[in-house]
Image: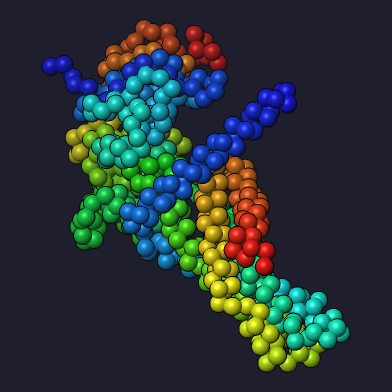
């Protein structure tokens, strides 16, 4: 196969992906606008996808806050700017690492689970069965997962921000003898409420990315168990790349490089 | 009296890329009758059921169900048309996160405003008709293959559809369960008074339940008629298929 043909095939596949994803988003929005929501299923998904991810999110955020503090606190004290460590840790956690790391962890745990579950339903004809019964797989499966993640990811991000700051505060005190009051004062000076809201807005967008990519990869599954494996891997890879790219764009738009 | 046609495939061709599954295939489904479709594995029999259920669209030709052309009909409009038809999948395709009772009651809960007690009553009745009332609270993975198929039947008939499509209902089952399922299909048709299309390889079962038999070969219907007419057909393809001979026009 020539380079041109391969390029053409890839382009068609990309356009098909874009078209399919647009259609999925459109149908999900239509279901939400018409309030076609399965509340009980949304609650179950919120519990399984959100509460189930809490421990791993808390652990990764705790260690991230601790390592930022570890890297910055001793040197900051050495240069006489120890009072800024609280600000540095909080600033990084709330605006960047909190939303992004939480999203990456959830993409790995939940995005893959969504793709695997829906992919298995495709290969065992459960999706065809839903359509055969006149039920929309989007309303039945996608919308509850989208809503659950849209609610739970910002909440998880709040917990991640808090635990990351607490971890940083602990390390700052233990290794650089920066007292918590000074740490908190610096944090309050560096980060405003607006920064927290913008961080949570990022989390909301990341939630949509994880839900749509996971569901789309699941619904596009072809070829039995191997296909489910491919869908699961692609869901995680595509979600993480989109999260990193979107994070850059949103940081630029929301914080304007400041 | 001339039998009336409930559904039909009109000159349908279906292909995926260069792979042609159905080629100028035409078939009429008589109202109120059980039509069995036979043919080699991979001949496209299950595809015909999916076409009749509106799950896939043909590349060309038309699919009619109760006078409606399913082709080029938007998914939203198909939802309404699908209330008239029901597909019992080969491996039941029950949602594994729901109990058998919840699976069977799902179309009623989603499409009607019936109270829970009424739905429970209808679901119990549907499960009773396939001899599975006792598994209401079981999960699909707790049932045997035969029980799963019958639970799939219960879900397929719970809304009392006009057309029930059975995809290989007896494949992989022992002779006793096969007979049980064959009798269940006949009994359900009598109870519902509707039309049924059955895909099967099991000739004994087919000639017990079918009113009409169609044989699919290389993407087209090559023989069609009342059960006895097909049983005594001199068509060499039909003869070879019915006798299971390796010698004949069907390449082995």
The number of numbered badges drawn on the structure is 0
- Does the rendering let one see residue A122? no
Q: Residue at x 39, y 12 (%)?
A: B222
Is the C terminus of chain A in the top left, top right, bottom left or bottom right quadrant? bottom right
Q: Residue at x 32, y 54 (%)?
A: A34
**Measured along the vertical axis of the image, is residue B228 above or below residue B94?**
above
Please tell me which residue lies in front, A147 or B191.
Answer: A147
In the image, farthest residue toward the right:
A78
Please tell me which residue lies in front, A32 or B49.
Answer: A32
Q: Residue at x 75, y 87 (%)?
A: A83
* Residue A12 appears left or right of B46: right
Horizontal and vertical percent for residue B175? 40, 36
Is the N terminus of chain A in the top left, top right, bottom left or bottom right quadrant? top right
Please tell me which residue lies in front, A103 or B240.
Answer: A103
> On the image, which quarter does residue B180 sit in?
top left
Please tell me which residue lies in front, B5 or A194.
Answer: A194
Horizontal and vertical percent for residue A193? 55, 77
* Residue B6 appears left or right of A178: left
> On the image, which quarter does residue B4 sit in?
top left
In the image, farthest residue toward the left:
B1
Q: Residue at x 26, y 28 (%)?
A: B68
Q: How is the image coloured?
A: rainbow
* Residue A9 appears left or right of B72: right
**Measured along the vertical axis of the image, is residue B91 above or below residue A74?**
above
Horizontal and vertical percent for residue A205? 54, 59
């Amino acid at each position: 196969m020539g380079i041109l043909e391969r390029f053409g095939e890839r382009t068609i596949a990309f356009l098909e992906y874009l078209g399919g994803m647009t259609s999925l988003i459109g149908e999900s929005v239509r279901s939400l606008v018409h309030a076609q929501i399965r509340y009980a299923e949304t609650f179950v998904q919120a519990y399984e996808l959100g509460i189930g991810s809490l421990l791993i999110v808390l652990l990764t955020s705790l260690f991230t806050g601790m390592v930022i503090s570890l890297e910055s606190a001793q040197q900051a004290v050495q240069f006489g700017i120890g009072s800024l460590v609280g600000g540095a840790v909080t600033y990084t956690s709330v605006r960047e690492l909190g939303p992004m790391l939480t999203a990456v962890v959830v993409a790995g745990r939940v995005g893959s689970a969504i793709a695997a579950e829906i992919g298995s339903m495709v290969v065992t004809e459960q999706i065809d069965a839903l359509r055969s019964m006149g039920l929309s797989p989007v309303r039945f499966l996608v919308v509850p997962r989208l809503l659950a993640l849209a609610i739970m990811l910002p909440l998880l991000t709040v917990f991640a921000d808090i635990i990351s700051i607490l971890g940083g505060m602990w390390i700052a005190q233990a290794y650089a003898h920066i007292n918590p009051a000074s740490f908190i004062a610096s944090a309050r000076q560096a980060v405003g409420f607006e920064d927290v809201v913008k961080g949570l807005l990022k989390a909301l967008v990341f939630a949509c990315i994880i839900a749509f990519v996971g569901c789309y990869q699941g619904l596009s599954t072809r070829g039995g168990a191997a296909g489910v494996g491919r869908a699961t891997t692609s869901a995680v890879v595509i979600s993480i790349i989109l999260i990193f790219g979107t994070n850059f764009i949103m940081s630029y738009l929301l914080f304007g490089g400041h | 009296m001339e039998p009336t046609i409930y559904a039909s495939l009109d000159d349908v061709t279906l292909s995926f890329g260069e792979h042609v599954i159905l080629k100028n295939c035409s078939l009429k489904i008589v109202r109120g009758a059980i039509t069995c479709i036979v043919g080699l594995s991979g001949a496209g029999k299950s595809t015909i059921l999916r076409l009749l259920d509106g799950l896939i669209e043909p590349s060309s030709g038309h699919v009619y169900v109760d006078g409606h052309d399913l082709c080029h009909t938007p998914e939203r409009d198909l939802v309404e048309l699908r209330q008239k038809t029901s597909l019992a999948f080969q491996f039941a395709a029950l949602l594994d996160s729901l109990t058998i009772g919840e699976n069977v009651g799902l179309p009623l809960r989603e499409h009607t405003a019936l109270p829970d007690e009424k739905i429970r009553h209808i679901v119990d009745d549907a499960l009773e008709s396939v001899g599975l009332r006792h598994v209401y609270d079981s999960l699909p993975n707790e049932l045997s293959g035969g029980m799963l198929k019958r639970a799939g039947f219960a879900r397929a008939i719970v809304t009392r559809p006009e057309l029930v499509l059975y995809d290989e209902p007896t494949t992989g089952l022992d002779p006793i369960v096969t007979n049980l399922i064959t009798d269940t299909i006949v009994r359900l048709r009598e109870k519902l008074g509707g039309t049924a299309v059955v895909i099967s390889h099991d000739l004994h079962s087919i000639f017990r339940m079918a009113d009409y038999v169609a044989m699919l070969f290389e993407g087209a219907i090559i023989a069609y008629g009342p059960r006895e007419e097909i049983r005594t057909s001199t068509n060499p393809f039909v003869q070879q298929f019915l006798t299971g001979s390796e010698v004949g026009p069907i390449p082995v």
